[in-house]
Amino acid sequence: MTYRHVLPVIGHAPALPALAAIGPPRLLAGLDGTEQLDRVAHLTRHGSPPDLSASELVALAEDTGLRGRGGAGFPFARKLSAVLEGRRRADGRAAVVVNGSEGEPGCLKDTALLLYAPHLVLDGALLAARALGAEEVAIGVTRADVAHSVRRAIAERGPLSTPVRAQLLMERFVTGEGTALTDGLDRGPGLPSGRKVRSSERGLNGLPTLLSNTETYAQLAVAARLGALGYRDTGDPAEPGTVLLTVAGERVVEAPTGVPLARVLALCGLGPGQGVLIGGYHGTWLPPSAAATAVLTREALAAHGAVLGAGAVLPLPEGTCPAGETVRVARWMAAESAGQCGPCVLGLPALADALGQAVGGGGQRALDAVRARMRAVERRGACSHPDGTARFVASALAAFPEEFAAHAQGSGCGRPVLGVLPVTGEGAYGADGPPGTGGGQHAGGHAAPLASRPPAPEQRLLVDWTLCQGHGLCADLVPGMVRLGADGYPERATMPLPARMRRRAQLAVRRCPALALRIQDGG
């Protein structure tokens, strides 16, 4: 039996996700009457987890059909088996990593778990750690409030046989890439390695590592308590259990697998609008007709060329410009580069600029240039970020062909860019908005979900016109924030510097051949 079960908004800050469930919740159980499940409340609601051997844990993962909930959907049993094999080659040593970085602005599900039900995640991670004989459990997060919540939960448990730590990492879209995450947890710069390195062979501290996302460990903890038969009594038979979704970047919904997408949207008071982006900014747009009939299983979404990924569901309302929203996100994605390979450092800003030119009335040649830029970055990056960004742009072009054609021809659609697709900070282009799309982000947009972090001291990037020689390198190193005019020189002499762009701006200052850039503290 399923029923509509709505949980209240927890907390008062706008960055805290509201919670809801279709049917009896599992991961979000108990949160309808309290703001957070501390250790006592957690045990009262869920009880103590069992201890399972490695073979029992693998069997449980196989019998429940548990897959990773961070994006790729890799079978968890195969991941466990690979770490066990790596452990045999590494003298019995292993580690466990929880990916709670959630760099996707349209996702808040892992944040919700770590803020409101952190002990469920710890249960799953420690269950795996004990079965593997792991030396350490490391939890990577990018929000200070999440780090505080997890550390408090760890302290509530007292002495643990396996050390557990929560580490605050740089907030960046690519932080959650496997090699970048383990590098950051090893106190490195947190960059993708650019090599095909399996964490099951070499991960945290060079050890075979079980690396999965927050929801996966919470699902494991639930499955261990329910057993395979109990776990499979809800959801789609081929893909049992529940799934956490973040809808419109604001509300986290727990739903049985196989639920209609339209039902999830209706629970949140939304419709498909002009289309629904599934899987976040490396995902795929579903047209309204497909969104009205799609159900949330891997097989059903694959028929539409989509994957659920990290569970982001982003409907596009009727009142905003799809082409302008796409430019806005593409510029933000370009700025989220790790800054270490050409397809990211040069290719993604060039792709975003080409898209902006097309939407600004550049004609068919500009649209052709967008497709050429997409081909230029595909399968060439140090990680999947260039491929995913190109896929997002390609999907938008396919979903809204008339919109892009009208903008390229100069007529446009007459709608503003409301900024309903969430990005952090000011996006990649500052407060003026992307060129040719009718203005910047609307004041009522949805950039708020991650806005509760304490503001960093204000800084500005300054151009000294007496020295600037128009080399243009700054536009490549700080893409979107510095735009070049028709004469090849920066359009502005002073630009607000978002905190997430400071490392790139410092690099631009160091590399400016004319020494014309500097960073200034304060207004």
Image: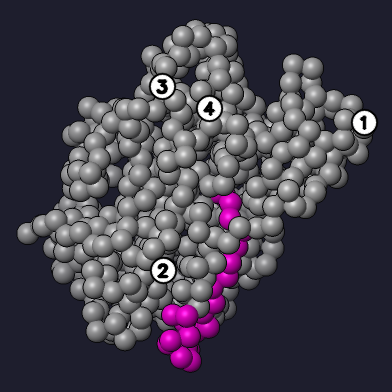
Residue picked out by circle 4:
439
Which portion, as a residue range, is magenta?
A: 152-174
Q: Residues within 10 Å of mark 4 (few under 14, many from 20)?
A: some
The amino acid at mark 2 is Leu
Q: How is the image coloured?
A: one colour
- Would residue 179 be visible to someone looking at this image? no
Quadrant in the picture for residue 69: bottom left
Q: Nearer the viewer, residue 145 or 372?
A: 145
Residue picked out by circle 3:
415
Q: Are marks 4 and 1 in contact (CB under 8 Å)?
A: no
In primary-sequence order, the first of circles 2 and 4 is 2
Quadrant in the picture for residue 453: bottom right
Question: In what element is the residue under mark 4?
Answer: loop
Residue picked out by circle 1:
466
Residue at (41, 22) in percent of width and height:
415
Which numbered marker is on residue 115? 2
